[in-house]
Image: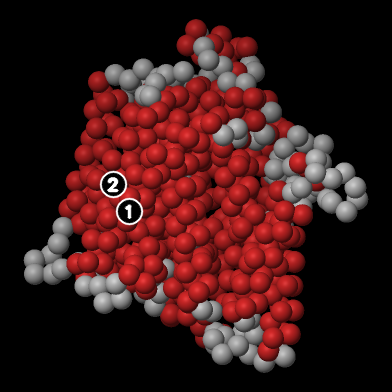
Amino acid sequence: MTTAFEFWDYFIFIAYALLILGVGLWVSRDKKGHQKNAEDYFLASKSLPWWAIGASLIAANISAEQFIGMSGSGFASGLAIASYEWMAALTLIIVGKYFLPIFIEKGIYTIPEFVEKRFSTNLKTILAVFWIALYVFVNLASVLYLGSLALETIMGIPMIYGVIGLALFAAAYSLYGGLSAVAWTDVIQVVFLVLGGLVTTYLALNTVSGGEGVFAGLKTIYEASPERFVMILDESNPEYKNLPGIAVLVGGLWVANLYYWGFNQYIIQRTLAAKSLKEAQKGILLAAFLKLVIPLIIVIPGIAAYVMINDPEIMARLGDAGLMNLPSLEQADKAYPWLLQFLPTGLKGVAFAALAAAIVSSLASMLNSTSTIFTMDIYRQYINKDASDKATVNTGRLSAGIALIIACIMAPLLGGIDQAFQFIQEYTGIVSPGILAVFLLGLFWKKTTNKAAIVGALSSIPIAMYFKVAPKGISTNSFFVDVPFMDQMGYTLILTMIVIILYSLKQHKGADDEKGIEISKEMFKTSPLFNIGSFAVMIILVVLYSLFWN
């Protein structure tokens, strides 16, 4: 399936690309008489305002995975997939109030650096190597693969050219400018991302309603397919294994969200670059509000596509173009590209720019964070402790370039793995509960010891595997259990925390660890603006879940 582009589509897309490159290189320029140092390159001189932080958080988060994958999930199962976005809004509030004050007070560059200050250099190095491998072989490679797959589906661009093109685009400004270039261009990327998404949503809903507008379209798709507007699925739903009912609100989704938004370097790094803690918290609040909007531009088009292809009257109205390459439930990821063929000239370019913005901004963020961890936690720790500012920045650029080359080699290989993205999600879900347990107890329980953290992190792997072997047919006896993926993450977190607590108590006989963090109520005080905004987010979430509970 390819979407025909005309002059104005190409013009808009090229203008977008030139704008991003121009702004990225302009903000990256060296000030006269000033050599970029580590703080300039990796933390944008700690000068980011709240609105740049909020925009950059969303741009780093949204990629082809959301535009193609979540729209496909909306097509196949409906609004329930929006819990990933809406629960993330609440998670961001928690991160802003309880995690950020500690991170910023410690003055860290990287999450592994926090591990060193709280636990040990050995544990920091283990996690630094793990995260570099995860970013290069999983995150960067998968974004390149899924992004180029989207370009191949929509435009007919061969995958290898898509991989190289996306890599060069992201590298053109992010390698030279560092986090400053990434964050400031993300402000523009988010505008294109939201604008392009809204254009596609408007077109889909307006088409469904026969030209009567968005609200008429929403009413039409709700009346045509009410089962796709259920947020909490029951066990009879075929998607229950992926979104296990009430556990979405109180179970394993919290593990995925807290790990991702709280301890993921390429997400948390832009908050560490804020002018101040209050500025970072305002940025977090903006991102939370944007998260409430994301399902409107990603999930709703997928539901609209499902209604369109199952309504003979609508399909007759669309004509021959709409009858070509119809996505099926087995090909749900084709739903978003299928919708794009109905966009008029010019708007196709806007929608395509939105997709490119989502992919490239995520790539740039991951590249910058990979180079930050390598440079600050490996290079300056073991290779050159007395590195000059110039050597540090150049190492960051070089390591990012090498990481990108490796990811480009790996990306096409993911096409040979059955259910590549699902495999990646499950792999991350095996290790994330153990790492989250280490961080939560390290932050908020002063008795947590270094050895207990290592034992807990290592034991979390077999604990997670216990909940996974039964579905693989390894054993059918009652010793093994078969639980949904989200439940597996929740159980693994709880059991790992118990292991760490028991080992810590045994080791120190109940005494506080010497590196335990002193926390007080004063540390977690937030501004009236943050408090009011947080309550507003929570009220909106309560209303949304009340409306679409079942």
Question: Which of the numbered marks, if any, corresponds to residue 171?
Answer: 2
Q: Determine if residue 135 is in view.
A: yes
Q: Quadrant of residue 331?
A: top right
- Camera-side residue of 323 and 423: 423
The C terminus lies in which quarter of the figure? Answer: top right
Indicate the amino acid at tag 2: Ala
In the image, residue 481 sits, relative to residue 379, either above or below, namely above
The percent coordinates of residue 250 (x first, y second) are: 72, 58
Mark 1 surroundings within 10 Å by alpha-carbon count, few (fewer than 14), some (14 through 19), many (20 or more): many
Q: Quadrant of residue 72?
A: top right
**What residue is at 69 percent from the left and 82 percent from the top?**
504
The percent coordinates of residue 544 (x first, y second) are: 64, 49
In the image, 540: left or right of 493? left
Quick one: SS at disc 1?
helix
Quick one: SS at disc 2?
helix
**What residue is at 38 percent from the left and 67 percent from the top?**
378
Check disc 1 and report the residue beneath it: 400
In the image, 16: left or right of 88? left
Indicate the amino acid at tag 1: Ala
In the image, 244: left or right of 384? right
